[in-house]
Amino acid sequence: MTDQEREAQGTPADAEQEPGTPAREEGNIADREGQPTPTAEQFEAGKPAEEVNPPDKAATSAATSEAGKPDSPSSVQNATPDVPAAEATTEPSMPPAGQTAGWQLAGGAARQTVADQRRAERAALAPIREEEERRATLSRRSFMRAGFWGTMGMSIAGIGYCTKENLFPLNVQGFGGPIAVSGAQVPQQGDAPLYVLTGKFYLVNLAPGEGAFGGFGDPSEEGGLLALYQKCPHLGCTVPYRPAFAFQGATGWFRCPCHGSTYTKAGIRVFGPAPRPMDTMAIEPQDDGSLIVQTGQITLGSTDNALRTTPYSA
């Protein structure tokens, strides 16, 4: 309802205002200073007046000029800052344009001074480092030299020790050395062999014509002593003497329990996989009737074992 209609009806312009609401300001929006007048289309669209009717640039410039003037003391005291103190920021102060080059020169001079100091320190430490490297090199060389001569000395000492052992053997006792057999232990001709455990041999006293069998080997003509090594030439088993074992109508044989190799009293192989007859050891008769058997002097067995007998008379 317009003001004219209200006047026609006799109602004042402010009569429709609800109780408790502030009184309407007198005048129209267009009467306000510094504000553009909105149009009906602008009210309907909900746009501000500045987008349709921008303010005059000249007026804006004048207002800005007036704002740049210093305020009076009274106005400064009563003015309230728009921005809180916590949010106020200050730009970092920059050196004047003419002093920028001087700052750069000063920084470059400082860096050059630090570089010169470092070069001087390295030059001062160079002799010390060279001396340390020289000492380290000498230490490595000394270590290698000492290791070389130490190894050579140990090798020469080992060779000398082995040579001494070979040239001057120790007095070995037991197997590998001389074994003494008393005269009372020597078997009679034709008797069963004597087994000497410490020397690992059989002492055999063959009778004349004994030791061969069926064309295997030659018999002993005069008889004598043989020391037969107990080790089978096939695979090294201990060969026992079996006086009751019968083979080809005869009794009393050396027979290997591993693979059945069979030998005469002279150690001549007559049967089995053994490659040769039993090995023999050297015998040294003594004046008192005793014997010395050199168990370290072993001769490979042969079909002439019976011919290797050592004559012996008690």
Image (cartoon, rainbow, N blue to C red):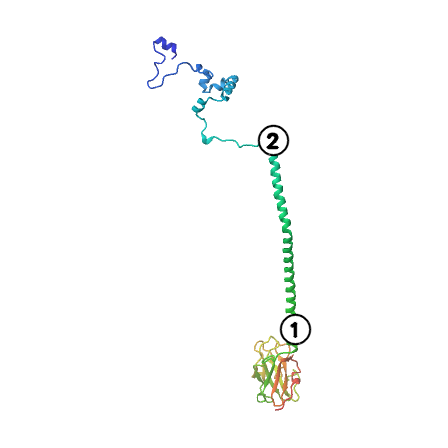
Q: Give residue 180's quadrant in the image.
A: bottom right
Query: Which residue is the site of mark 1?
Result: 160
Tell me the element at label 2. helix
- Up the image or down, 25 lies above or below 192; here it is above
Q: Is residue 127 visible?
A: yes
Spot occupied by residue 53 in the image (x, y as percentages of width and height): 49, 17
Q: Give residue 154's quadrant in the image.
A: bottom right
How many residues crowd around disc 1 within 10 Å: few (fewer than 14), some, or many (20 or more)? few
Report the residue at 63% width, 49% height from top: 122
Sequence-earlier tag: 2 or 1: 2
In this view of the protein, which residue sits in the foreground, 199 or 32? 32
* Left or right placement of residue 81 versus residue 130 in this view: left
Spot occupied by residue 160 in the image (x, y as percentages of width and height): 65, 73
* Left or right placement of residue 156 versus residue 71 in this view: right
Q: Quadrant of the C terminus?
A: bottom right
Report the residue at 63% width, 47% height from top: 120
Say what amino acid the circle numbered 2 marks.
Gly
In this view of the protein, which residue sits in the foreground, 189 or 171? 171
Spot occupied by residue 304 in the image (x, y as percentages of width and height): 67, 83
Query: Which residue is the site of mark 2?
Result: 98
Q: In this figure, what is the number of numbered marks?
A: 2
* Left or right placement of residue 17 versus residue 257 in this view: left
- Up the image or down, 301 lies above or below 113; here it is below
Spot occupied by residue 242 in the image (x, y as percentages of width and height): 56, 83
